[in-house]
Image (tube, helix red, strand yellow):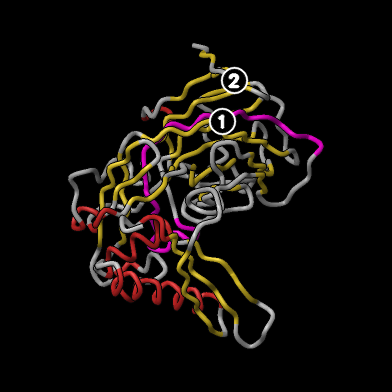
């Protein structure tokens, strides 16, 4: 059924029913929907763990959740006329969360996240999402700007492919700036493109350091169009941000990590931020780690002054109640 809004018309709806959900990238999957270039589709997306945790779950529940597979993908959608070498343009028209989300980290032995060696046991926090605010502990409020962590088309290589790593054709990119109003471009490798989306986040720090943002089931509305004149090798996009949590310049507290290796520098920057949050904002180290994943942005500040490089972690001070 077609539904009109002020600026676009929803031509198709895909529910999160089992028949519309898959958990691998595979160009042999039958499309669940065929559309014309320029059509608008509303995707109902499950959370990244496919309902294994919820508002009343605990860290033990997360620790015992199955990560094999993750990312229940809604799709695939076949776009008429799409051919290998074309580009799929995805205009993100609207994203609507369903009132809750979760952030957590797995037991260190699983090796997930930036600092598995620092956290032996799992951690979990269920967020109450009200409008554009997510409520954390100690009165901390995180601004929300939802985005789909996973947008992708099928790869040319035959067989089933894991959804966890990002690929030339997109997938689990977790780019927090692919928000409402953004346009994403994906290189098409198979006929029809076979587009799917999932793994939505209500908010995320640039880095998603504990391996989860604010993971949320969500509705994603997007216009899918073929661009035959474009030629790209990996995903590209246009966005207005937000490049800070509030969408404008604001006071930040920053920690730096300095090392000969960018990953080591990143770990140092985040560890220093966890130290800061524990010492100055009355958070446990686990709470601080999850907050970093939800709100702290990582930036590569310097890569030219050999032998040491700098990664900086930025924390917006406006999220704290005293501000």
Contact check, label 2 and label 1, Cβ < 8 Å: yes
What residue is rendered at 56% in x and 45% in y? 178
The magenta span reads: 205-229
Residue 111 magenta-highlighted: no
Residue at the image position 72 percent from the left and 51 percent from the top: 233
Vertical relation: 31 (above or below) 10: below
Give whichever of 268, 191 is nearer the camera.
Answer: 268
**Residue 65 visible, this orientation:** yes
In depth, the one of 87 and 149 nearer the eye is 149
Look at mark 2 in the image and give the residue it sits on: 8
Query: Mark 2: few, some, or many residues within 10 Å (few <14, many ≥20)?
Result: few
**Main SS category, magenta section:** loop
Viewer can see residue 199? no
Q: Residue 152: horizontal and vertical position, in percent?
A: 57, 42
- Name the residue nearer the viewer: 221 or 75: 221
Give the label on residue 93, or none.
1
Under circle 2, the secondary element is: loop
Q: Is residue 315 above or below residue 212?
A: below
- Give coordinates of residue 117: x percent, y percent: 34, 76
User: Element type at marker 1?
Assistant: strand
Residue at horizontal 56 percent and vertical 81 percent from the top: 261
Q: Looking at the picture, how far across and down is residue 30, in whole percent?
A: 52, 30
Q: Is residue 15 left or right of residue 40?
A: left
In this picture, residue 117 sits left or right of residue 25: left
Residue 310 quadrant: bottom right
Q: Is residue 222 magenta?
A: yes
Occupied quadrant, residue 282: bottom left
């Amino acid at each position: 059924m077609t539904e009109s809004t002020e600026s676009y018309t929803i031509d198709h709806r895909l529910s999160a029913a089992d028949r519309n959900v898959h958990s691998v990238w595979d160009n042999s999957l039958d499309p669940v929907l065929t559309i014309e270039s320029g059509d608008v589709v509303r995707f109902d997306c499950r959370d990244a763990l496919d309902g294994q945790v919820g508002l009343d779950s605990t860290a033990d529940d997360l620790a015992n959740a199955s990560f094999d597979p993750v990312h229940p993908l809604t799709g695939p959608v076949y776009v008429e006329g799409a051919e290998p070498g074309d580009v799929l343009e995805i205009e993100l028209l609207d994203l609507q969360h369903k009132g809750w989300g979760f952030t957590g980290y797995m037991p260190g032995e699983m090796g997930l996240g930036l600092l598995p060696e620092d956290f032996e046991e799992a951690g979990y926090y269920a967020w109450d999402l009200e409008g554009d605010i997510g409520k954390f502990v100690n009165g901390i409020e995180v601004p929300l700007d939802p985005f789909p962590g996973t947008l992708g088309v099928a790869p040319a290589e035959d067989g089933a492919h894991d959804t966890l790593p990002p690929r030339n054709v997109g997938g689990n990119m977790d780019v927090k700036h692919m928000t409402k109003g953004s346009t994403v471009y994906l290189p098409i490798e198979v006929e029809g493109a076979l587009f799917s989306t999932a793994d939505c986040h209500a908010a995320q720090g640039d880095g998603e350091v504990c391996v989860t943002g604010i993971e949320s089931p969500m509705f994603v509305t997007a216009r899918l169009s073929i661009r035959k004149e474009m030629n790209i090798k990996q995903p590209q996009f246009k966005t207005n941000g937000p490049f800070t949590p509030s969408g404008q310049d604001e006071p930040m507290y920053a920690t730096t990590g300095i090392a000969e290796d960018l990953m080591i520098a990143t770990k140092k920057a985040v560890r220093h931020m966890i130290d800061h949050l524990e010492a100055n904002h009355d958070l446990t180290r686990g709470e601080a780690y999850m907050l970093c994943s939800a709100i702290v942005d990582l930036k590569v500040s310097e890569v030219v002054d050999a032998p040491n490089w700098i990664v900086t972690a930025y924390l917006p001070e406006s999220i704290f109640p005293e501000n």
